[in-house]
Image (cartoon, rainbow, N blue to C red):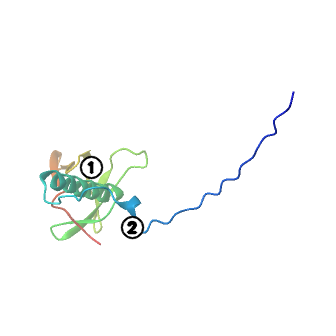
């Protein structure tokens, strides 16, 4: 019996540079005026605004500047004025709405903030 020797072949792989950059082509062009793209852009904008609010970026209501402060436990926090301090507790944070409450002279006062209309301070 004859033993077969193992034959080892060396294969050289060369990286080919694509001249026309086809790997970055996602396919057909996007119609930015379509209803779907408009809806997706709105959702992305609302998500960005919500992230800015939750992260504690200052926003302006009227002539005063406020900031959202989250509790260290990770639960909902409160809204704080840069001038006077505490303003109200946050009860609910939705995609485009924030519900707050405070007590004035023993009565509960509800406050709704629309994230679509808030102006964030740079």
Task: Identify which residue is drawn at 76% across, 44% down.
Answer: 7
Q: Vertical placement of 118 versus 70: above or below?
A: below
Task: Tell me where residue 59 sits by quadrant.
Answer: bottom left
From the viewer's perspective, is residue 53 above or below residue 9? below
**Front residue (pair 109, 5):** 5
Picture residue at 15% right of the left edge, 47% below the top: 110
Name the residue located 43 percent from the left edge and 45 percent from the top edge: 73
Which residue is tagged 2?
Answer: 20
Q: Quadrant of the C terminus?
A: bottom left
Compared across the picture, whether 67 is left or right of 13 comes to left
Q: Quadrant of the N terminus?
A: top right
The residue identified by callout 1 is 89
Residue 56, picture quadrant: bottom left
Q: Whole-percent x and y of residue 105?
A: 16, 50
Viewer-side residue, 114 vs 87: 114
Q: Which mark is residue 79?
A: none
Classify mark 1: helix, strand or loop.
Answer: strand
* Place of residue 108 in the rendered image (x, y in percent of width and height, measured from the top left): 17, 45
Residue farthest to the front, as pictured: 1
> Which residue is farthest top?
1
In the displayed structure, does residue 81 sit left or right of residue 34?
right
Question: Dot 2: within a 10 Å radius of its alpha carbon, few (fewer than 14), some, or many (20 or more) residues?
Answer: few
For the point 17% across and 60% down, the residue is 32
Give the mark nearest the N terminus, 1 or 2. 2
3D distance between C-alphas at marks 1 and 2: 56 Å
How many numbered markers are drawn? 2
Taking depth in this image into account, of 10 and 40 the one nearest to the observer is 10
């Amino acid at each position: 019996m004859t033993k077969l020797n193992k034959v080892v072949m060396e294969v050289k792989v060369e990286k080919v540079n694509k001249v026309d950059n086809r790997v970055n082509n996602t396919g057909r062009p996007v119609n930015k005026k379509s209803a779907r793209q408009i809806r997706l852009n709105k959702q992305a904008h609302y998500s960005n605004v919500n992230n800015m609010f939750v992260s504690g970026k200052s926003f302006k209501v009227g002539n005063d500047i406020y900031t959202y402060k989250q509790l260290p436990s990770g639960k909902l926090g409160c809204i704080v004025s840069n001038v006077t301090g505490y303003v109200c507790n946050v009860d609910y944070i939705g995609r485009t709405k924030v519900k707050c409450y405070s007590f004035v002279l023993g009565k509960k006062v509800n406050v709704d903030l629309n994230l679509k209309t808030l102006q964030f301070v740079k």
